[in-house]
Amino acid sequence: MTWVIGSLIVLAIVVAVICGALIEVFRQLVQIRTAINLSDDAIPLDVRPGELHAGDLGLPAIAEALPAAIAVFLSPKCATCIAVAEAFRGGAPETVWFVLTADREQVASLSHRLAASEQRIIVDEDGGIAKRVGVDVTPAVFTLHHGVVVHANAVSTARQALGLVPTTLPRSRGRENGRTGTVVAPVSSELRR
């Protein structure tokens, strides 16, 4: 019986040493990423808050009624755009709109991936919307609050695009100023700048 207890103690010590080594590896990875300036953050675009509205992005009036929304600009010519569209394959929340910058034939490669969200797809055939808002990079994500663009980012991964999707959380059951409603919160706290 003592050999079983001794074996468990040895096993616990080995597991503790392995966990400690793994923690140290992750700390070193963070230090390496910092040292070589390797960050996986969305790149802010030069858009002033309040400068653009949902209509400027080609979004319908219903988008202006949402407390928070995003417009994702995608092009079928870039692999990252295809990866972002693939991330939304099963459907996107009602707060996500897609602006596809290409002609109808080229858009087919993206629109079948976004079929579950087809009612929120805007096709920018002549590139007029992209030119009007100054988008010369895709994928790009415009964040809107009550129909007003508050910031825009170029994203390099589907994870970054998904991190910008706003969520609506129900308020507490109490009443505030005699009204009930929703509280809008970003998915990630690192988005606030």
Image (cartoon, rainbow, N blue to C red):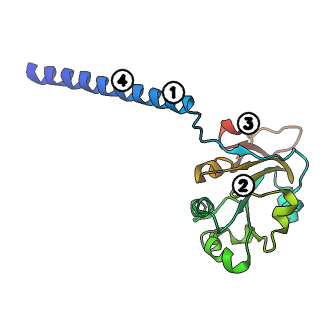
Residue 76 point in image, percent of width and height = 65, 69
Of the residues under marks 2 and 3, which one precedes in the sequence? Answer: 2
Residue behind mark 3: 192
Residue 136 location, x and y as percent?
77, 58
Q: Position of residue 113 (x, y in %)?
A: 60, 70
Number of marks present in the image shown? 4
Question: For numbered disc 4, what is the local secondary structure?
Answer: helix
> In the rendered image, which residue does mark 4 sit on?
20
Marks 1 and 3, how far apart at CA: 23 Å
The answer to whether residue 58 of the structure is visible from this angle is no
Mark 1 or mark 3: whose residue is earlier in sequence: 1
Q: Amino acid at mark 4?
A: Gly
The residue drawn where x is 59% and y is 51% is 157
Badge 2 element: strand
**Residue 178 is drawn in which quadrant?**
top right
Quick one: quadrant of the N terminus? top left
**Label 2, label 1: how far apart the Cα atoms are:** 29 Å
- Determine the image quadrant of residue 17: top left
Q: Earlier in the sequence, mark 4 or mark 2?
A: 4
Residue nearest the viewer, comparing 167 with 160: 160
Which mark, by number, is residue 31?
Answer: 1
Q: Are marks 2 and 1 in contact (CB under 8 Å)?
A: no
- Hey, what amino acid is under mark 1? Gln
Q: Residue furthest front?
A: 36
Name the amino acid type tagged 3. Arg
